[in-house]
Image: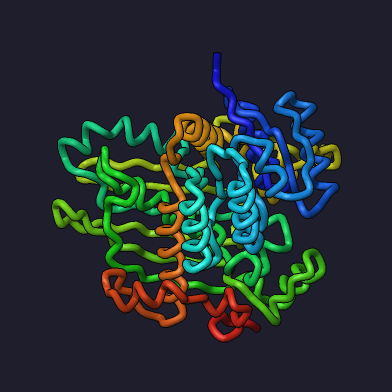
Amino acid sequence: MTQVLKIGIVGAGFVAKFHARAMLQVRGVEIAGITSRTATSAEALARFVRANSLGEARVYRSAGEMAAQVDAVAIFSPNDTRLAIVEEIVEAVKKGAALKGVICEKPLGRNLAEARRMVDLVKGAGLKTAYFENQIFMKPIKVQLAQLAPQQLSMGPLVLTRSAEEHGGPHEGWFWDPTRQGGGVLSDMGCHSIAVGWYVLTPLGKSPTFLQPVSINAECALLKWGLPRWRKALLDKYGVDYSKTPAEDFTTGMITFRNPESGQIVKAQFTDSWMFEKQGLRLFMDGMGPGYAFEVNTLSSSLQVFIGDAAAEAVADAEQALEKSTATRGLLAVQHNEPDLYGYTDEIEDARKAFLAGKDAFLSWDYGLEITKLVMAGYLSSEERRSIDLTDPAVQKKLETYIPLIQQGKGKEVLHLL
């Protein structure tokens, strides 16, 4: 019989619902509880869970109260709430809550100090952890690694990767607010692209942090959502004023890594934006090795549909076809199982197995801490307009307390506005 992990979810917004859809495809998990600052959202998610026989989904008043009734807590709430939630969970453990583990959706923290405090808290409580970075678990990534394993062994590992995540902008107002979210698109999606680039460059059989970061050179810009027309649209829809506290909607950069065994240098390029004007969410990754290569593009779908103008009024929710879809007519790419394609199902299964075995997941919060460090170094590089030496002890020390100007609400000092 499959052993069941009863999960309590903190947060009931877009990502919580997406994970719930993914859990429908994973044996041995139940959503036993939900807590959210928005009661109506918690009840709506609970109804979805119960309607799909995914668990009891009892709605709790707090994470601390819920922690005593579940096996694991998954933190899917806004970034600015997470440290306080971890403090609640740890306090519940001290009072006797027998948790098997704690999950945190990316990013681990808005800055390195916040992320490190979260790691210290869970370690002090003896909790196992899972850092949810879904793109590392994408089946296309896993399959290309397996398919190209003989080439890696005979010719050597990949030497260059390019990763991108792009769409037209987040669903909720707090994502757009740099003080709550931690920045703009570099904090929101750059963490994905940095992680998957680092991962696919890693030689077979080595840990996800085997390659040593050497340097990062990054740039942040406000290109679309800084224009007056789009600033007004953002203010009218979400109440976020980019004329006062802007965040970047575009970022790109290059990270250099060193193999500590061979001394070989490899590079990972990342590009992320909230101003992608094509079908909807696009994940793109490719890699080059000596004599071989791979490419992933999630807009290359095995299913396409066409909706003409005459039929467009009858269209269903566009996001049934593709997350953050930007159109309801024309030739549309359709992904019939986005949670599985994007790696959500496999990361949940990994956490289930790990927690039930009394272990950390494949990606622990220590790994999430290292990703936070690289994201912060990217902001520092953009602010100072120079390459950041990640081997410099002085830089490492500075990153421990560094808070990007954009995250402080001072984005006007480093971003261009008309």
Image point (80%, 37%), residue name: 316
The quadrant holding residue 339 is: top right
Q: Is residue 168 visible?
A: no
Whether 328 is drawn above or below 381: the answer is: above
Q: Position of residue 297 (x, y in %)?
A: 48, 43
Whether 106 is drawn above or below 173: the answer is: above
Name the residue nearer the viewer: 204 or 338: 204
Name the residue nearer the viewer: 225 or 368: 368
Q: Say left or right for 407 vs 233.
A: left
Image point (53%, 56%), residue name: 107
The quadrant holding residue 141 is: top left
Q: Say left or right for 396 vs 192.
A: left
Q: Say left or right for 304 vs 349.
A: right
Image point (40%, 81%), residue name: 385
- How many numbered dots are placed on residues in this image? 0
Image point (32%, 31%), residue name: 146
- The colour mode here is rainbow
Q: Residue furthest front?
A: 95
Whether 385 is drawn above or below 211: the answer is: below
Name the residue nearer the viewer: 207 or 141: 207
Q: Position of residue 400 (x, y in %)?
A: 43, 72
Q: Residue furthest top?
A: 1
Quarter of the picture containing the N terminus is: top right
Q: Is residue 5 visible?
A: yes
Q: Position of residue 24 (x, y in %)?
A: 65, 28
Q: Residue furthest bottom?
A: 413
Q: Position of residue 49 (x, y in %)?
A: 75, 32
Quarter of the picture containing the C terminus is: bottom right
